[in-house]
Image (cartoon, rainbow, N blue to C red):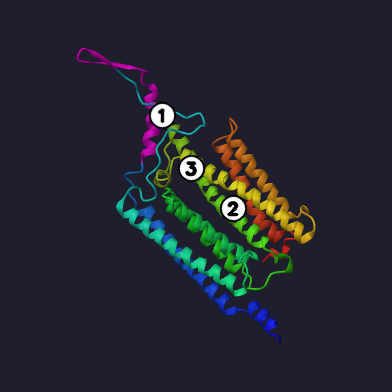
Amino acid sequence: MTPAAATDLAVATNEHLASISNTLVYSSMAVYTLAFFAYIAEWLFGSRSKVARTAAALTAAPEAAKAPAVTVRKAGGTAVLERPKVVVRSASGARDVPDGPGAHGGDVQGDLYGRIAVSLTVLAFLVELGGVVARAASVERAPWGNMYEFNITFSTVAVGVYLALLGLRKNVRWMGLFLVTTVLLDLGLAVTVLYTASDQLVPALHSYWLYIHVSTAIFCGAVFYVGAVSTILYLFKDSYESKLQAGGRPGALATSVLERLPASASLDKFAYRVNAAVFPLWTFTIIAGAIWAGDAWGRYWNWDPKETWSFITWIAYACYLHARATAGWKGRKAAYLAMIAFGCWLFNYYGVNIFVSGKHSYAGV
């Protein structure tokens, strides 16, 4: 055996590093589980006495509406005009209500559990990142050559985006429980159904475009995911505010959870901003994929299922962003469009790779 052949064999069969990667991924799942329980504790032990801001603001509206427009009272010999405070909707349909205090409810004990949860999330992120790096080192290539590798990299980047927002002092800790829950589901799917042994790539993937095109696709998906979480929570919070405004009485559990979230207007604005920020990069992802297709297959566009659904996803997000800038398409209508767009992204990732045959079939499980 020549030295070159021996080197190729070593690269293709470095099971030791692959085993280390698997151990680190499983270890990260254990730490994420601890973080999950810490986030649960943050919600459970946070103060319930400081979570009535939305209810107070909205239930005051009907009483204020019945009051006279101007009340006159005399202070000494001077007439003083008192105008009642009325909670109204803005032009975009958002209610003028304050943000909730967060999962910890403004409570010291709840905040302590929240800080523990974030610390565990950071530790789990670092351990999972080590697993991704070890997987890459086991075959000396980018760690996203199949769906298992894509999954573990995607969840790592999603958690990284969340931690980066926290590092920028953005108030997004309310997202931690929902993020860690879905990350655990994603990793559980990865290590069971989608697991693929460490191996070399098919010839078509040997290109520097693998580092450019797929890495941007992963990052875009992670940011779209963060936007989708915010959009889902917006829909729940908006329904809660609407029920309060109509004089309804939501259940105790719904009140305890939804009162701590940001106002629906804040959630809606956050989702729009993250989706709008990453949309140009998704455009670049599609263009980079087309250039890679031209190098690999001789045609820039073949209407392959993966190409088609990537373009459908682009159209869906473009419609969402356009709707946000169009009168009458804000709030829930735009949120439904955002969820349809993210659903297209999910199908492009899971559905196309698993159930549809095409030139991207080599990315299967």
Residue lying furthest left: 76
Neighbourhood count class around disc 1 (C-alpha, 10 Å): few under 14, some 14–19, many 20 upward: some
Name the spot of residue 350 as percent of width and height, x first: 65, 58
Using residue 310 as the reference point, say whether residue 51 is left or right of it: left
Quadrant of the rendered image containing residue 296:
bottom right
Q: Residue at x 36, y 21 (%)?
A: 67
Quadrant of the rendered image containing residue 320:
top right
Name the spot of residue 96 as percent of width and height, x first: 43, 33
* Relative depth, front residue between 353 and 273: 273
Neighbourhood count class around disc 2 (C-alpha, 10 Å): few under 14, some 14–19, many 20 upward: many
Depicted 301 relative to depicted 237: above or below: below
The residue pinned by badge 3 equals 267
* Relative depth, front residue between 354 and 358: 358
* Viewport quadrant of the C terminus: bottom right
Stretch of the chain drawn in magenta: 52-80
Residue lying furthest top: 77
Q: Which mark is residue 87?
A: 1
The residue pinned by badge 2 equals 220
Would residue 358 be visible to someone looking at this image? no
Which residue type carries mark 2?
A: Cys
Name the spot of residue 357 as percent of width and height, x first: 75, 60
Q: Earlier in the sequence, mark 2 or mark 1?
A: 1
How far apart are labels 1 and 3 at the CA level? 19 Å
